[in-house]
Image: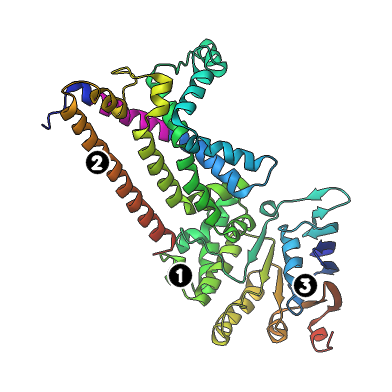
């Protein structure tokens, strides 16, 4: 469960968002400049709200009234950025194991194999990020986030930097992820078609305000 | 002409010891300071930056004299260290290492700072979302990615330390076997009749050491850069 009720001023731009989502995939939909990325960064703890609270999986990670702000690294979230952000000095295997090492989790070969198989990245393990295609990088980034065993997976336009054919290559993996990984996701996109395939709930944003909230049908209602 | 006398050997080995110790001790401080200057905003940052660069622009004899006033036996810090910890800098090789460390510090810090500034902060953010505490972000992402700069800074600092003269001779004088480095040995030799050949030998050795250091810096930087770009 994810409960968000926040206000944040960023220069001229003001973001106000309030919603509660029980869905497996909460889609944040809106044009560029609508505040999607600011909102997901606030959920991640990379931005601190001016007022309000965020509750992830029953834990209050932000509450300005109570002075609570759990730092990003203690939120147990996974974050897949538009630009994969793999560590260039580590090979793929080390990139995948990074979250496990940082969280002090014991090795879980079964889960490792499951994630590697799910994303078809077994052949890449000994390579360096510099040698990978954009689509491969994004799959590794997904695997890296999943293997840190997050309780919430945040995805900020993970297909945004890919061309059409690459998008179609990754989309099935995301659907499998939703159905098999069992981790709730927040999925940011400006592409209604993408969200129709993936999301179970939609938060529609416009100029920093939530204009609609509900099932994927709100995408067709025109906001 | 290429028979190196025991006195010359002593000076060479002392120079190497002084420069190695100065570089190794200064490096952690240099990294910490470079990180502060690259990544943090705080009151007095420009002042700190200026102080770090002072040894580069002050006459070395002034830096040496200030070290003598501070770390000499009757100096504020030197007196305390001698009384409480038994550490003496004045007229000892440790003092030469201190002088060399201070003089080479700006050259050490600068490449490290530049390379930390060049590390993509989005990678540090990614590490944070994967559960890395701030110091682990530094240890596992920032520092490895800044490694070419750290090595370049160390080599540059070492090369500066091995050739330091003005501050060293002012602070710890020119005592054979204790504080007489290659530079001060050359200085003594060219003031001695018949010292020319010996001086020439030491000059050649310093040139070899300096060029060697520059080549090493280049090789390190290339290797590290290739590694970081994922090849």
Q: Residue at x 52, y 48 (%)?
A: B113
State yes or no: residue A49 in magenta.
Answer: no
Disc 2: host chain = B
- Rounded to the nearest angstrom, the CA distance separating label 2 from label 3 is 69 Å
**Mark 3 element type:** loop
The residue identified by callout 1 is A122
**Mark 2 element type:** helix
Q: Are marks 3 and 1 in contact (CB under 8 Å)?
A: no
- Check the image and report above or below for A125 versus A68: below
Please report the bounds of the magenta region as a residue range.
B9-23
Residue sitting nearer the eye, B78 or B127: B78
Residue sitting nearer the eye, B91 or A9: B91
Q: Is B38 left or right of B5, judged from the image as shown?
A: right
- Rounded to the nearest angstrom, the CA distance separating label 2 from label 1 is 50 Å
Pointer 3 or 1: first along the chain: 3
Work out which residue is located at the far right of the displayed protein and give it: A65
Q: Are marks 2 and 3 in contact (CB under 8 Å)?
A: no
């Amino acid at each position: 469960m994810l409960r968000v009720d926040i206000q944040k001023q960023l220069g001229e731009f003001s973001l106000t968002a309030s919603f509660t989502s029980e869905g497996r995939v909460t889609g944040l939909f809106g044009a560029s400049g609508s505040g999607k990325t600011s909102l997901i960064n606030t959920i991640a703890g990379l931005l601190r709200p001016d007022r309000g609270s965020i509750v992830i999986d029953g834990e209050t990670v932000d509450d300005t009234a109570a002075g609570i702000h759990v730092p990003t690294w203690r939120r147990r979230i996974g974050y897949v950025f538009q630009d994969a952000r793999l560590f260039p000095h580590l090979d793929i295997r080390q990139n995948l194991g990074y979250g496990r090492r940082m969280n002090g989790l014991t090795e879980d070969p079964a889960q490792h194999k499951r994630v590697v198989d799910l994303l078809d990245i077994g052949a890449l393990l000994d390579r360096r990020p510099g040698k990978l295609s954009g689509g491969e990088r994004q799959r590794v980034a997904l695997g890296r986030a999943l293997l840190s065993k997050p309780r919430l997976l945040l995805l900020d336009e993970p297909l945004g930097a890919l061309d059409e054919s690459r998008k179609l290559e990754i989309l099935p993996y995301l659907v499998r992820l939703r159905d098999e990984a069992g981790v709730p996701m927040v999925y940011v996109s400006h592409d209604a078609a993408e969200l129709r395939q993936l999301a179970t709930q939609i938060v529609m944003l416009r100029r920093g305000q939530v204009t609609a909230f509900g099932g994927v049908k709100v995408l067709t209602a025109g906001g | 002409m290429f028979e190196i006398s025991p006195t010359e050997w002593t000076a060479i080995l002392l120079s190497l010891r002084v420069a190695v110790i100065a570089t190794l001790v200064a490096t952690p401080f240099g990294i910490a300071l470079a990180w502060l200057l690259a990544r943090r905003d705080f009151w007095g940052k420009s002042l700190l930056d200026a102080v770090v660069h002072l040894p580069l622009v002050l006459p070395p004899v002034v830096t040496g004299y200030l070290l003598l006033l501070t770390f000499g036996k009757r100096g504020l810090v030197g007196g305390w260290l001698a009384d409480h910890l038994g550490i003496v800098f004045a007229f000892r090789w440790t003092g030469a290492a201190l002088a060399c460390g201070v003089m080479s510090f700006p050259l050490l810090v600068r490449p490290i700072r530049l390379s930390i500034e060049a590390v993509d902060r989005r990678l540090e953010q990614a590490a944070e979302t994967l559960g890395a505490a701030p110091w682990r972000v530094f240890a596992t992402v920032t520092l490895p990615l800044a490694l070419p700069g750290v090595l370049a800074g160390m080599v540059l600092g070492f090369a500066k330390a091995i050739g330091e003269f003005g501050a060293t001779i002012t602070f710890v004088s020119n005592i054979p076997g204790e504080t007489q480095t290659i530079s001060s040995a050359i200085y003594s030799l060219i003031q001695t009749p018949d010292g020319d050949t010996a001086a020439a030998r030491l000059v050649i050795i310093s040139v070899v050491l300096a060029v060697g250091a520059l080549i090493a810096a280049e090789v390190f930087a290339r290797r590290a850069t290739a590694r970081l770009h994922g090849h």
